[in-house]
Amino acid sequence: MQKLIRSQMKPEIQVFAKLEALTHAAATEFVQKAQQAIQARGRFTVVLSGGSTPKSLYALLATQLWRDQISWNQVHLFWGDERHVPPNDSSSNFRMAQEQLLFQVPIPQENVHRIKAENSDAQAVAAEYERDLKQFFQLGEHEFPRFDLVLLGMGANGHTASLFPGTAAVHEQTRLVVAPWVEELNSDRITLTPPVINNANTIIFFVTGVEKATTLKAVLEGQHQPDRLPAQIVHPAQGNVIWMVDQVAARLLSTAVSLTPD
Ligand code: 6PG
């Protein structure tokens, strides 16, 4: 029997003993959101996260049992952020999703809206992706896209997407996409901005690993300091946030309990 913790704040925290159970629950949410959006609006717009944690989800969605539950020709894939590298680079978030998911599902090429980070000018990459979003969502001046689902991870330093501690990107309120220089990575990144993320219908955070326990507690139960903990900037206006975390990442949370043991 699953037990959900509803904190005072809106976020819902789901804790899983094992990655398999977390991945299965995440795939269930993905399929449900896809079917609901397609039924309601004829399409499902989803933002994929990068890093390593979502790999198992993408791989599970690519399996026959799961992929056949989604009509991929009505799915539009976007990315929350990208490393400033070409799409065939081993650190490319697009490449990871391509290998784990895109190569195995019947999604039309034109439904894959990647960040074209092969351009050496990171600011131009961000500007192009902003134009792509404005065109796809037919946005007017000062309007933000409303994604059906945004997937996010969290770094041990509290960053999410490529909103890193101490960067101006954390406080961006007008642009849809920016290209912050990230000192600690000695590199540019390209990222969706907080107002875009916070305009989503549903946001799911995946957080696993003991190295993230202290940060997760600070983000969910600590003082509001988004400069130091950018993941705290995620507060959807009308949508909901689900934190899917494993037991070791949740071990310091004062409200969390273990969910499905195995
Ligand atoms: C990226 C991500 C980033 C990621 C976190 C967590 O490009 O790296 O989008 O925000 O979600 O760094 O990464 P892990 O899942 O690898 O811990």
Image (tube, grey):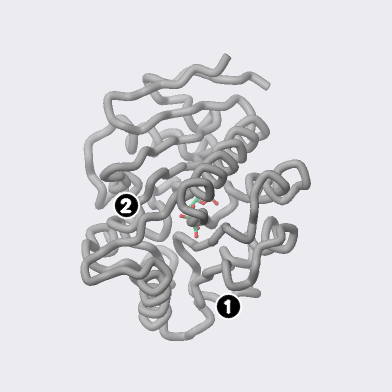
Q: How many marks?
A: 2
**Which structural element holds mark 1?**
loop
The residue shown at (58%, 58%) is: 74
Q: Which residue is mark 2?
A: 199
Q: Quadrant of the C terminus?
A: top right
Left/right placement of residue 192 relative to residue 53 reads left
Q: Which mark is residue 234?
A: none
Judged from this view, the residue extending furthest toward the top is: 1
**Which structural element holds mark 2?**
loop
Looking at the picture, how far across and down is residue 83, in whole percent?
50, 69
Q: Is residue 159 above or below residue 258?
A: below
Residue 25 location, quadrant: top right
The residue shown at (45%, 63%) is: 81
Left/right placement of residue 114 relative to residue 80 reads right
Q: Is residue 60 visible?
A: no
Looking at the picture, how far across and down is residue 233, in whole percent?
28, 48
Indicate the amino acid at tag 1.
Answer: Pro
Pointer 1 residue Cβ closer than 8 Å to ligand 1: no
Residue 213 location, quadrant: top left
Q: Quadrant of the N terminus?
A: top right
Q: Is residue 137 visible?
A: yes
Q: Which residue is mark 1?
A: 86
Judged from this view, the residue extending furthest toward the bottom is: 120
Looking at the picture, how far across and down is residue 239, in whole percent?
34, 42
| Disc 2 residue crowd, few under 14, some 14–19, many 20+, Cα 10 Å | many
Looking at the picture, how far across and down is residue 105, in whole percent?
71, 58
Left/right placement of residue 19 relative to residue 44 reads right
